[in-house]
């Protein structure tokens, strides 16, 4: 820091700037006090560096340039992050800022994989600290050893060969990763590389979507799916929209508890998703077969492979997914999904990809359970229920995804047709009230929440009924014939689960119901007309482009 700059601050902000001590003819300002004063002053956008985020302060820059520790921060209320997670994230923020951490995610995952599985190589990188050229040589050697997976190192190698900022900070990154994975204190065991990778992907998920439509599946939501589906060693697991590989990794983690690993398969919607999924799996010691290229849903429909478990969190309400006659396809035996919304294409494709006895979990927007009466979606809902393919719908609360206010979601549990005699009933679980609110825009589910949902499902499936008294306000087993007779074939669990009645003003409620009923009928008519209009347009487009 130039002395003139400090003198200018002191002169312009005489009332608030820290007071110096005088030694001879020299004014000495206390460094920590200056840093604390600068912490209150944000850097204007036109003066921020290339890797400085909006909201960064002069104090953060001052501390980083002098090699000082980051400023202490108060944890957010109800924070779910433990000490090592807070310290690790703060170190990365201090090193690069959030945008820099997103930029160098591939480098971090590569180093975590080396840390876990190549201790000798890790020691050579640490002592003396490696350069970007040293790490590039390590990745080049790994690419030669396994040419089929060489593509996943591509972005990391480009950064190592061309990014001067990475060259200047790699040694600090190595030290941060070594410290976080070796810092056992008292009875608290240091996290291994897998825990660090999982935390980092979750923490960054609100900032670095692999495609604009995809959201990283929260760990507890993935846990609910695995505890219900129960993937086992040797089974074929498939995620047709694999994101960062979080559901495939969760399936492998669950199967390991049973003594072995499943075979992981999937498709990625983007090159970025393909690379991050491979790196995420590598940190866990897993290999995922994602094929040589990216595949959208329409490119998967004619593939013959079948799986024991399909689990996926696809884009919600994807508007442009079909081409030509895609909607009229054998993969959609329960009815043609609309060309302007892929929700029921994803659901049917998951069922059609199952082997005999297979099971699937598909995360859906809550609107999929209630979309327009008389529409293609209502028709498909009815046939899925009538055929016994749809076993259970779980309603989950909103705001589960990091970085964005999100609506309530549903998890649809399905079985392959003909694998067993369909039950006369299906299960609805209303989990909208579970979890803990963090701040104003995020909700967190615990493993206890996941256990409650999964145990309710398995109790119903094994005993044929719900016995526990606390299930009454949480779940309901409903005969299928009752579900399909319901107007609109609505599959919202809250419509079937008994909830304690709240006091109501009957006169006002009757008036409101009359108004809402008329409005709803009008909206249904508009939605049905819009569905038909869009389908006519899509048919015309297909005819012109054929």
Image: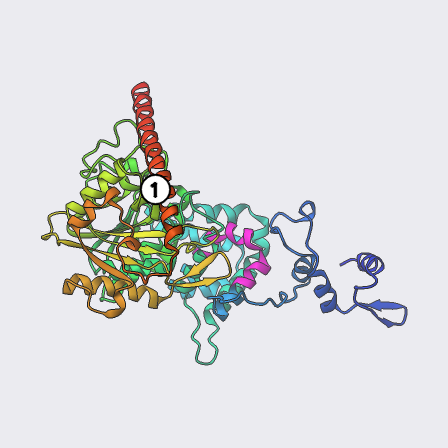
Q: Quadrant of residue 211?
A: top left
Q: Residues within 10 Å of mark 1 (few under 14, many from 20)?
A: few
Q: Position of residue 279 (x, y in %)?
A: 39, 53
Residue 111 in view? no
Q: Which residue is mark 1?
A: 517
Residue at far left of view: 421
Q: Which segment did they paint magenta?
A: 89-109
Residue at far front of view: 507
Q: Position of residue 338 (x, y in %)?
A: 29, 34
Identity of the residue drawn at 35% across and 51% down: 409
Residue 19 in view? yes
| Horizontal side of residue 151 vs 228, given as left or right | right
Q: Position of residue 290 (x, y in %)?
A: 30, 46
Asked if residue 176 lies in the magenta stretch, the reply is no
* Residue situated in front as seen by the camera: 530 or 203: 530
Image quarter hosting the N terminus: bottom right
């Amino acid at each position: 820091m130039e002395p003139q700059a400090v003198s200018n601050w002191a002169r312009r902000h005489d009332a608030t700037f820290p007071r110096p001590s005088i030694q001879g003819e020299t004014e000495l300002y206390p460094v920590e006090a200056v840093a604390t004063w600068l912490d209150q002053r944000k850097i204007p956008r036109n003066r921020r560096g290339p890797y400085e985020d909006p909201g960064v302060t002069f104090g953060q820059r001052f501390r980083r340039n002098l090699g000082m520790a980051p400023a202490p921060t108060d944890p957010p209320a109800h924070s779910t992050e433990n000490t090592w997670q807070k310290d690790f994230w703060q170190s990365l923020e201090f090193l690069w800022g959030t945008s820099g951490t997103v930029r160098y995610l591939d480098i971090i995952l590569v180093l975590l994989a080396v840390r876990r599985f190549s201790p000798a190589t890790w020691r050579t990188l640490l002592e003396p600290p490696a350069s970007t050229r040293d790490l590039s040589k390590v990745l080049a050697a790994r690419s030669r050893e396994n040419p089929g997976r060489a593509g996943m190192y591509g972005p990391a190698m480009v950064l190592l060969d061309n990014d001067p900022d990475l060259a200047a900070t790699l040694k600090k990154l190595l030290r941060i990763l070594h410290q976080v994975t070796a810092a056992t204190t008292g009875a608290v065991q240091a996290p291994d590389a897998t825990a660090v990778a999982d935390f980092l992907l979750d923490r960054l998920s609100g900032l670095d979507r692999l495609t604009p439509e995809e959201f990283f599946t929260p760990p507890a939501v993935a846990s609910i799916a695995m505890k219900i589906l129960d993937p086992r060693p040797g089974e074929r697991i498939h995620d047709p929209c694999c994101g960062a590989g979080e559901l495939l990794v969760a399936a492998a983690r669950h199967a390991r508890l049973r003594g072995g690993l499943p075979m992981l398969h999937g498709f990625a919607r983007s090159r970025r998703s393909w690379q991050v999924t491979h790196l995420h799996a590598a940190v866990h010691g897993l290999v995922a077969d994602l094929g040589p290229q990216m595949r959208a849903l329409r490119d998967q429909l004619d593939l013959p492979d079948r799986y024991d478990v399909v689990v996926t969190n696809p884009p919600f309400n994807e508007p442009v997914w079909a081409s030509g006659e895609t909607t009229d396809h054998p993969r959609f035996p329960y009815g043609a999904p609309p060309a302007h919304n892929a929700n029921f294409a994803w659901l049917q494709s998951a069922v059609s990809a199952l082997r005999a006895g297979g099971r699937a979990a598909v995360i859906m927007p809550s609107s999929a359970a209630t979309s327009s009466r008389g529409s293609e979606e209502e028709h498909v809902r009815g046939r899925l229920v009538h055929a016994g393919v749809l076993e259970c719908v779980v309603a989950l609360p909103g705001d589960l995804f990091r970085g964005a206010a999100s609506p309530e979601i549903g998890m649809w549990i399905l079985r392959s047709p003909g694998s067993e005699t369909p039950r006369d009933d299906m299960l609805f679980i209303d989990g909208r009230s579970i979890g803990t609110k963090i701040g104003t825009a995020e909700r967190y589910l615990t493993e206890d929440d996941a256990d409650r949902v999964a145990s309710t499902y398995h109790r119903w499936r094994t005993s044929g009924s719900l016995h526990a008294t606390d299930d009454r306000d949480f779940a309901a087993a409903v005969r299928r014939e009752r579900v399909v007779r319901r107007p609109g074939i609505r599959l919202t669990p809250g419509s079937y689960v008994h909830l304690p009645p709240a006091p109501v003003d009957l006169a006002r409620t009757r008036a409101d119901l009359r108004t809402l009923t008329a409005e709803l009928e009008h909206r249904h008519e508009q939605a049905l007309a819009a569905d038909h209009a869009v389908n006519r347009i899509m048919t015309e487009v297909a005819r012109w482009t054929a």
